[in-house]
Image: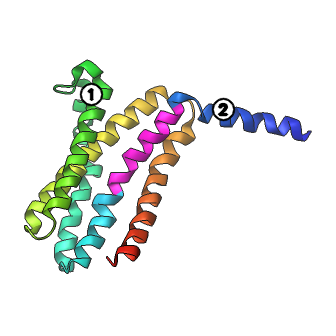
Amino acid sequence: MSSLGAADPARRTLAAYLQPKTLLMLVLGFSSGLPFLLVGNTLGYWLRDEGTSLSAIGFLSWVGIAYSLKILWAPIIDRVSAPGFGALGRRRGWMAIAQIAVGAAFIAMALVGTAHGLVLLGAFALLAAFCAATQDIVIDAWRIESARIVGAIIATPRAAEKSASRDCARASRRSGW
C-alpha cells in the first residue's frame, strides 16, 4: 500500500471530525464532562484547602450521586419539553436550561464559599450536580440520535475531565491555593 493510499483514510477521518455537527458534539461533550469533575474532585480540593474536616468533605461528596441517579429523571427529560424554552425544541431547550443552571450554581458556589456555611454551599453543589447530570442526559441523547463518529461521543467528556483536573492543579499552584 502506498503512502498516498494510507493518507486517504486519515483525511476522511479528519474531514469527518471537522463537520459542523461533529464539532458541536465535541464542544457539547466537553461541556458535559467538565461539571462532573468540578463538583467532585475540585470541590473536595477547595474544601480541604479551606480547612474543612474530612468527614464534612466526605459527606458533601455525595452530591456526585446525581450522576448515578440520573436514570430516574431521564425518561421525564426525554418526553417533556423544557419549560420556557420549548421553542428551541425538546433537546435544545433542556440543554439551555441545564447549562444556564449549572453556570448559575457554580457562580453561587463561588460567591457563597465556605464563609456562609457548608449547608448553603452543599445545596448549590447539589443543584450544580443535578443540572449537570440533566445536561449529560440531554447531550447524550442528542449525540446518540445524531452521531456518526462514536469516538466523539466517548472521548470528549473524558478529555474535559482530564483538562479540568490539570487546569485546577495548575491554578492552585499559581495562586497558592
Answer left or right for 156 relative to 40.
right
What amino acid is found at the position of numbered circle 1 in the picture?
Gly
Q: Which mark is residue 15?
A: 2
Q: Main secondary structure of the magenta part?
A: helix
Q: Which residues are magenta?
A: 22-36
| Badge 2: residue crowd in 10 Å (few <14, some 14–19, many ≥20) | few
Query: Looking at the rendered structure, which numbered label has been put on residue 71?
Result: none
**Residue placed furthest toward the right:** 2
Q: Are marks 2 and 1 in contact (CB under 8 Å)?
A: no
How far apart are labels 2 and 1 at the CA level?
Answer: 29 Å
Q: Which amino acid is tagged 2?
A: Ala
**In what quadrant of the picture does the C terminus appear?**
bottom left
Per the image, is 64 magenta? no
Image point (38%, 45%), residue name? 31
Verify whether residue 32 appears in magenta: yes
- Residue at 49% over, 40% down: 26
Query: Residue 35: image x %, image y %?
Result: 32, 52
Q: Which residue is mark 1?
A: 93
Q: Position of residue 12 (x, y in %)?
A: 71, 32
Against 164, residue 28 (above or below) is: above
Where is residue 100 drawn, in percent x and y? 24, 40
Please state if 4 lies on the left or on the right of 98 as rendered: right
Q: How is the image coloured?
A: rainbow
